[in-house]
Amino acid sequence: MNFLEQIWLIPLFPAAGALLNGILGKKLPKRIIDTLACGLVGTAFAFSVGAVLQLLRLPEQQRFFRTDLFTWISQFVVSWGFQLDPLSAVMILVVTGVGFLIHIYSTGYMAHEGGYYRFFAYLNLFMFSMLTLVLANNFVLMFVGWEGVGLCSYLLIGFFFHKKSAADAGKKAFVVNRVGDFGFTLGIFLIFTTFGSLDFSQVFEMTKARAATGAISAGDGVITAICILLFVGAMGKSAQVPLYVWLPDAMEGPTPVSALIHAATMVTAGVYMVARCNALFVLAPKAMMLVAVVGALTAIFAASIGLVQNDIKRVLAYSTVSQLGYMFLGCGVGAFAAGIFHLMTHAFFKALLFLASGSVIHALSGEQDIRKMGGLKDKIRTTWWTMMAGTVAIAGFPPLAGFFSKDEILWQAYSRGHGLLWLIGAVAAGMTSFYMFRMMFLTFHGQSRVAAEVEHHVHESPRSMTVPLMVLAAGSVAAGWVGIPHIIGQYLGNLPNAFERFLDPVLEVSALETGLRPAEWTEGAVMLVSVGIAAVGLLVAWTFYLKNPALPEKLKTHFRALYITLLNKYWVDEIYDTLFVNRTKDLGNLLARFDLSVIDGGVNGSAWLTRLTASISGFFDYWFVDFAVRRSDLIYYMSYPLRRIQTGIIQNYAALTIAGILLIVSYPKILPIIRYLFMK
């Protein structure tokens, strides 16, 4: 079977699941619902694997396949079409593979929740939207998928819509993403204005051709504007400062939703879009520097907030924001392959961590506060060791996946002359190691702080939940080996970085370097420093929460102002409420009053005037027109005798005529008699 020619079916499978469960799910048993949802996503994964394997058989420079199903918008030729190249190949494997495991996990996690069919319909729709986004061959179709994942995030974050906090979180995600989407939309308009096309191949080929002829040079103002606008869209979708505030609140949704959003779908869309547009970004050094700086600042900013979070899912949420910052840091310094590599490895360990946290919450009857946990290691052992694998991976310890991808980003930043960005990333890595092991130690180790009524029935999750954890744990361990660093490859028979080599045909080389590349041995030194920083984070967490548990409380007292600042997340939400939300509400109230007093006043005033006019008209009509009509009854009765003689018979008319003549002739004789009778 030629899977390449059938790539259009890959997004269609989950779309069919969403349609069937959405329409018929209410009347279907749960087994049919989850079989449809999981089976169709699994089929999409199988087709993805088949298509990627066939793509790998092609020569490196010919690994590109495109299919246009039909012309969607004919005015300026926008097709409904898909393309598969190394970049989209990585994405569809991540989306369908990790998404399939999350679907299976959901059958156990959501088994006793209401709205079962609705949940899987939304989940399938999410998959369809993300697959449309990554397989699209033009900006318009990408935007359809882009908006689709935004809609699905709103539906799934607010899945428990009877909870005000969940409904508010869904609205917050929707509104904040609209801000970013506005920038993305303007960027698309500017691309069409500049190139006259929205097709990826045409836009990027024209960009390269104009750059080769000198029509466009590095730093061109229009290209820079396009890239900045596109990045604004990416900031919203991928939760970068200052548009990150929706992502932590997204924890109000079911845990499988958190895993899907954070690992395989929505938040990776912005990183993918920037990497897809690399041909534009390499010609906009200022825009790329903006991407790198925002990524680095987001990484350390979110990591600092994660240091003091106590909700197990919110710890992971801020870690996602931070890790996305690393991906943008990689893309911003021109290491697009490193950014996508971290996206891929992050999908494994972040999905694992979220699903494992869901297993903990499931075991503790909904408890999410890590201060009320502890001592769970031997009670839910599978959850413990799989979550530990994810923690070691995200902390950056070799030989797990996170070490290879995070170290590659830090090395690329350092080797390209961005020492300050490397330092920020390294400090954020130490923070990541600390707060992740803090979470693990408080959750699984030490004395139990679980409530007595909950502790007696703590149990491991069903196999439908633990098997996906084990598969993801294996990915968290092994996935990094497809992109081994050059210095390690030298000691393994000069093995190349296979992942970087695979993506080379679709990625442009950036000139964003501010110094000479350091000697090769420096990569090993930077790597050792990175591992050392992660080890320091682990050691500090162990000291604080296992060796000397009283120490954190002392530090809270000693550095109370800093602790309160971090605990309140720098008051960013409160600042946004004051500057934007409340001002928007004030404007809304002002417009409401204007509407009530001016608009409604005019409408209601005209209605009052109409009623007054109608009342006067009614009075005149009743007392004059109707009075005249009523008086016309007299005419009716007076005309009655005359109507009686209008028979239409000529003999009657002749008789009346003769009677009239006789009356006239005899009138002088009769008049005295009448006077005598009536005037006597």
Image: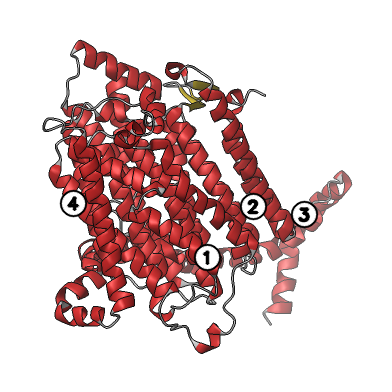
Number of the front mark, 2 or 3: 2
**Residue holding disc 2:** 22
Q: Secondary structure at mark 1?
A: helix
Number of the front mark, 1 or 2: 1
Label 3 crowd (10 A; few <14 / some 14-19 / many >=20)? few
> Tag 3: residue type?
Gly
Number of the front mark, 4 or 2: 4
Quarter of the picture containing the C terminus is bottom right
**Residue holding disc 3:** 660
Quarter of the picture containing the N terminus is top right
Q: Which is nearer the N-term, disc 2 or disc 3?
A: 2
The answer to whether residue 590 is visible is no
Q: Position of residue 349 (x, y in %)?
A: 44, 53
Q: Which is nearer the N-term, disc 4 or disc 3?
A: 4
**Residue holding disc 4:** 424
Label 1 crowd (10 A; few <14 / some 14-19 / many >=20)? many
Label 4 crowd (10 A; few <14 / some 14-19 / many >=20)? some
Residue under the image location 43 percent in, 64 percent down: 251
Say which of 252 and 445 sits in front. 445
Q: Which is nearer the N-term, disc 4 or disc 2?
A: 2
**Residue holding disc 1:** 383
